[in-house]
Image (cartoon, rainbow, N blue to C red):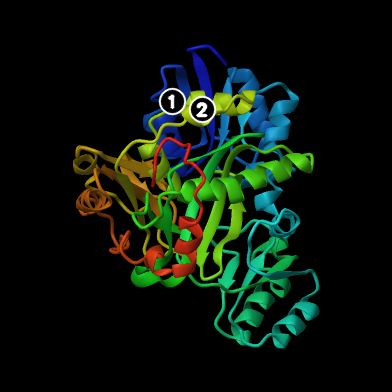
Amino acid sequence: MKSNQLNVLILGYGSREHALGWKIAQSPRVSHLFFAPGNAGTAEIGTNVPISDEDVEGLVRFALETQIDLTVVGTNDPLALGVVDAFQAVGLAIFGPNQQAARLESSKAFAKGFMSRHSIPTPRYQTFTAYDEAVAFIDEQENGRLVVKISGLGKMGMGVTVCDTKDEAKIALHDYMIKQTLGESGQTVIIEERMNGPELSIFGLSDGKTVVPLTPVRDHKRIFDNDMGPNTGGMGAFGPPEDLPSHFLQYVTETILQPTINGMAAEGHPYVGVLFVGLMQTALGLQVLEYNCRFGNPEALVLMSLLESDLVDVMTACLEGTLSSDQVKIGLGAATAIVASSPQYPAEVFPLGLAISGIEADISLPHVELFHHGTAVKNNQLVTARGRVFAVTAVGATLQHSLEQAYAAIEKIHFEGMHYRKDIGQSIPLASQNVAVVKEMMEYERPFSFNRLY
């Protein structure tokens, strides 16, 4: 992939894929971008292809016919379906882990077992395939402060229930295992101890041997301000947080990211692609809540806004096994992404086709980008097409500056019933208040060798 005339295909439909395409399009090596299936925003920077990102055979056929030089997997389902394996089988370059490595996300049972085998800190848990045994386990617990998770992939942020009582845990269990509200993904469940503390998203790029971290990001999952209401796919994100110790990334890389990459290689499944680690800063220190095997959404919007390196060059280095930390340059400042959602989201039913206005005024602002998530064009009018509709992303010299710009921009856009959180970047408790976490970090005194201190 040394040519400066690359055809690049991005798999997915959301604002993450729009942001990845926006960044990839900045590379002088790229000739044309394709999105499968894409959205109204991706159509402005490339060509949308009417192929589902889960249609592996159709995607391979299109990539061969169109002479795609590099494919980037945005969403989780194609990875679980083996899209990387299928592309590699016919000699096509594709950025993402293969099906076996992607079990870190597609099977929480595998991921928790992997963490146990490789001494990666994670909350205590039990795995169940029998409903009655899971109910009995809940009854044995001192209280109901538990987390019930499906082992397989969830949809739209679903598949994890944080419980306060045993009854809540049993209801979640019944929904997943008996009612099968999320299908076969709930045939195996994880019941996990519930921990408290600020959550943090860490992403690392890997070539199977080396892993290089990106900007730490915090996201907001709950639909309403003050972290109230049900979980969603993500209502906003910001980074880097201002309360992290200076050695934080070095510590996380050497105690969590690199051991994960080493462990996957040792088990015969080298991990190539981007690895997400969902962390919680607890009184017991850092705990890994989950892995994802692709960029997060909306975290990717923050990451792409702050990444200075040519993303195509970095992905090529990952595929060729030549990645090094000096290839990944992170810009100064901070970025904030604020998500606008449809009325009634995240309920299963919400209105679609609502006219969107104000986009032109928004995108004319400096240091602001609007990334489409669930949009379409009907009769020359931009309209809503999914629960999460778009995300306004702003870069500033400081976190506060980026917040101010993002909120000033999103206020210019409107559709009927439009909802967005008013407290992005404000409602997360400071990690500095967590004495155990800070002590753990500050005692970690190995030399910092990456591009930037956080």
Q: Secondary structure at mark 2?
A: helix
Which amino acid does the dot numbered 2 rest on? Val
Q: Amino acid at mark 1?
A: Asp
Q: Residues within 10 Å of mark 1 (few under 14, many from 20)?
A: some
- Specify whether 153 is left or right of 384: right
The foreground one among 40 and 338 is: 338
Judge whether 327 appears above or below 217 on screen: above
Give the residue drawn at x 39%, y 69%: 433
Q: Are marks 1 and 2 in contact (CB under 8 Å)?
A: yes
Circle 2 crowding by C-alpha within 10 Å: few under 14, some 14–19, many from 20: some
Q: At x 47% / y 70%, what residue is drawn?
A: 230
Q: Quadrant of residue 218?
A: bottom left
Q: Position of residue 368 (x, y in %)?
A: 26, 41
SS for dot 1? loop
Rendered image: mark on residue 273: none
User: Can you say whether 199 is above or below 97 in the image?
Assistant: below
Is 122 rendered above or below residue 8? Answer: below
Residue designated by label 1: 310
| Residue corresponding to mark 2 | 314
Depth check: 325 or 139 in front?
325
119 and 99: which is toward the camera: 119
Residue at 36 percent of width and 38 percent of height: 306
Residue 295 appears at what percent x and percent y? 52, 44
